[in-house]
Amino acid sequence: MAKHKEDREREEVSVSVVIPVFNEEVTVGNVVARTKNTLEQLGISYEILVVDDGSVDRSADIAQKLGAHVLRNKHQGKGFALRHGFRLARGEVVVTLDADGSHKPEEIPLILRYLTEDRADFVIGSRFSNSEDNKTKIPKINRTGNRLFNDLILYLTGARTSDSQSGFRAIRSSLIKRMKLGSRGYEVESEMLVKALRMGARVAETPISFDQRTVGRSKLDPIKDGARILYVIVTSYLS
């Protein structure tokens, strides 16, 4: 999948999968391999962009050996990594998923379905829609915060979502290019969603599976990152 810069600028693909990575050498190889296999089975043109956010382990090397195109940053945060990937993505549709193994690449077709059927422009893979099992895998403080953010987005935009913080998504690249994203951290999901709604995009959710990470620990700080998410929801609505 790695290509010369000139070739990447000329060629277009159907789907770009953007995977932000920070010290996930134990899981990223499995995620990339399964993503590649799923996209091959779909029979579509694709690229896998792994955006390494300054990892100090072998995450980038592992992803590259498995065929991903690796973009390397100094450590800036998930939002910065995603924005880097979005700038270079060539796909008509961009899919995002996490590198820790919590999302199932085999469910990419579920995320893409609403777009290929032209029923949505922005699809969120919801961990909470019709799934009691998923709820038990997510810490209570994270579930509580998610409900708070969902309610605030509903109050501001009138759009009801069950999982505004999910990192498993599919978005039309034409929509992303019209957004002026500035988030550096985990608040990027909320910024994208609120700005998409403000732009009149059709937003849909589809149920997904979820596996709590078993290796390493989450980089999300519920208090610090939660405050940033609240702030960006309001400022994205007002901008």
Image: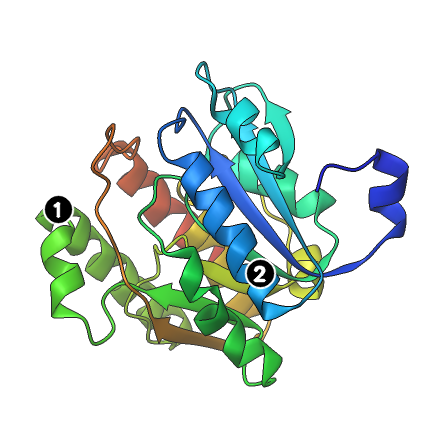
Query: Residue at (27%, 42%) from the top-left corner?
Result: 226
Observer-nearest of 223 and 216: 216
- Disc 1: CA contacts within 10 A as few (<14), some (14-19) or many (>=20): few
How far is disc 1 from disc 2 in space, using C-alphas? 34 Å
Question: Which callout, 1 or 2, points at the residue further toward the start of the chain?
Answer: 2
Is residue 154 shown above or below 27? below
**Label 1 belongs to which residue?**
141
77, 100: nearer the viewer: 100
Q: Position of residue 88 (x, y in %)?
A: 73, 43
The foreground one among 17 and 221 is: 17
Q: Is residue 235 visible?
A: no
Identify which amino acid the numbered label 2 is placed on.
Leu
Residue at (24, 51) in percent of width and height: 211
Q: Is residue 12 visible?
A: yes
From the viewer's perspective, tell me whether residue 145 is left or right of residue 97: left
Q: Are marks 1 and 2 in contact (CB under 8 Å)?
A: no
Say which residue appears at 16% left-offset and 51% top-offset. 138
State the SS at label 2: helix
* Number of dots carrying numbers: 2
Q: Position of residue 48 (x, y in %)?
A: 61, 46
Residue at the location (31% across, 37% down)?
225
Residue 233 lies left or right of residue 72; in this view the side is left
Image disc number at residue 39: 2
Helix, strand or loop status at disc 1: helix
Above or below, 40 against 120 in this view is: above
